[in-house]
Image (tube, grey):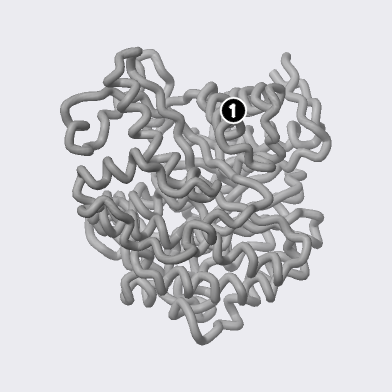
Amino acid sequence: MSTLQFPPDFVWGTATSAFQIEGATSAGGRGESIWDRFCRTPGRIVNGDHADVACDHYHRFQEDVALLADLGIPAYRFSIAWPRILPNGHGKLNPQGLDFYSRLVDELLAHGITPWPTLYHWDLPQALQDQGGWPERGTAEAFVEYVDIVTQALGDRVQHWFTHNEPWCVAMMGHARGEHAPGCASGPAALAAAHHVLLSHGASVPVIRANCPGAEVGIVLNLTPAYPASESEADRQAARRFDGGFNRWFLDPIHGRGYPADMVDVYRQRGWLPEGVLPFVQGEDLDTIAEPCDFLAINYYTRAILRGGSEMEQGGEPATLPPPAHSECTDMGWEVYPEGLRDLLIRVHQDYRPARLLIAENGCSYSDAPGQDGRIRDERRIQYLRDHLAQARLAMAEGVPLQGYFAWSLLDNFEWQFGHGQRFGLVALDPATGRRLPKDSAAWFARLVASPATSIP
């Protein structure tokens, strides 16, 4: 037995996102999103899966809130689908969409659960994509309009807001690698998209504050600590380059440092910035991006091990090595490396000094089937969560102002390009009936949350 002890005011929650759980993609006046279009493009999603139904949370949200209450989870991070609010991205409001989230917030509050909405979790209205999407400055302006509408409607009841989830994925997975919607493969477009996502974040912060007096506002970054494969200078440089593109390109500007000069040079060499300048930056953009926030939220899943080579000479990507042979990996193929969370939290605290830190996502995909008694004994998930929370607690002991943890995810759901084959949930979903079945990990998490100092095997 050992003890995971956290402060009494530590925020405990679980997390989801609209596109991954809601379904009802054409119900209630919702417009098409880029992920709806992406899912219908042959070859994009494993097994041709889609999220037209997903967990059917749109019709079963009361059941899901009751489930959270039964587990004693005090906070819930969910996202709001922009196409439900403004089907065309801007302009005409869809009252049915706004009413859905108003009812969800009311249901959470009636059960004593604090809502923590994310305003953008990747489901851009397709109508805006047809006008150029995130590489175009107008999308940032449309986002601020959308944020204004939502926070005016919900700000009397919601006091905690995340602006964006994982800008790196929006920019790089969606616009450079083409593995996420909208499926582009353009480095210059990726950098422009990253800038406009960050710009829309900074521009929306004062709007949220005006509409929700006293509210807390922050952004969610997916960060991956980079480790050199050896002590060689080449490997150290490879780790720094990975860190520059994955972490510092987003951490630096939101903390008032602008874009890292070493990566500007790398992208120049790569041909993403031919003139070595940032053509998408205008006027006071960098000041806007650096608008002070109340917290920084981090999503952590695994680490990266880097090796340098000749591909780096012209600004290329360093080689990311596979996990060491002795490592445990999740069903996603991601190495289980809890120590990376402690290293990451300490690094961010020491280098950037955010006022507060939250872990907005942490979890693992394991396909554990029910036993003959119907019980899902997902011991590997329990161990994953426990080991990562232990490392988070060590970081807190070293002065890191970590004040909350959201487990990913409440439900097994639609996992983007991997379809329905990856299972991150504390709660399983019967694909035939939609029945929710809490796994052993849900009971474990509920016991932990019930007491700030709980002895757990």
Q: Residue at x 36, y 47 (%)?
A: 418
Instruction: Locate residue 167, reporting x and y percent.
Output: 45, 52
Choose between 310 and 396: the one closer to the eye.
310
What is the secondary structure assignment of the residue under circle 1? helix
Please tell me how many numbered marks the rendered image carries: 1
Residue 412 in sight from this viewpoint: yes
Residue at image location 44% in from the left, 40% down from the top? 248
Q: Say left or right for 423 vs 14.
A: left
Q: Name the residue under label 1.
A: 346
Q: Quadrant of the rendered structure where residue 452 is? A: top right
Whether residue 377 can be seen here: no
Disc 1 packing (10 Å; few <14; some 14–19; many ≥20): many
Vertical arrangement, residue 54 with respect to residue 85, above or below: above
Report the front residue among 148 and 154.
148
Looking at the image, residue 439 lies above or below residue 259: above
Tell me if 226 is positioned left or right of 221 in this view.
left
Image position, residue 28 (x, y; %)? 54, 79
- Measured as percent of width and height from the top left, residue 238 is found at 31, 27
Q: Position of residue 249 (x, y in %)?
A: 42, 45
The residue depicted at 48 percent of the width and 49 percent of the height is 253
Quadrant for the N terminus, please.
top right
Work out which quarter of the rendered image holds the C terminus and state it.
top right
- Tag 1: residue type? Ile
Indicate whether 233 appears above or below 86: above
Q: Residue at x 73, y 45 (%)?
A: 73
Does residue 221 appear to the left or right of 208 in the view shown?
Answer: left
Toward the viewer: 382 or 149?
149
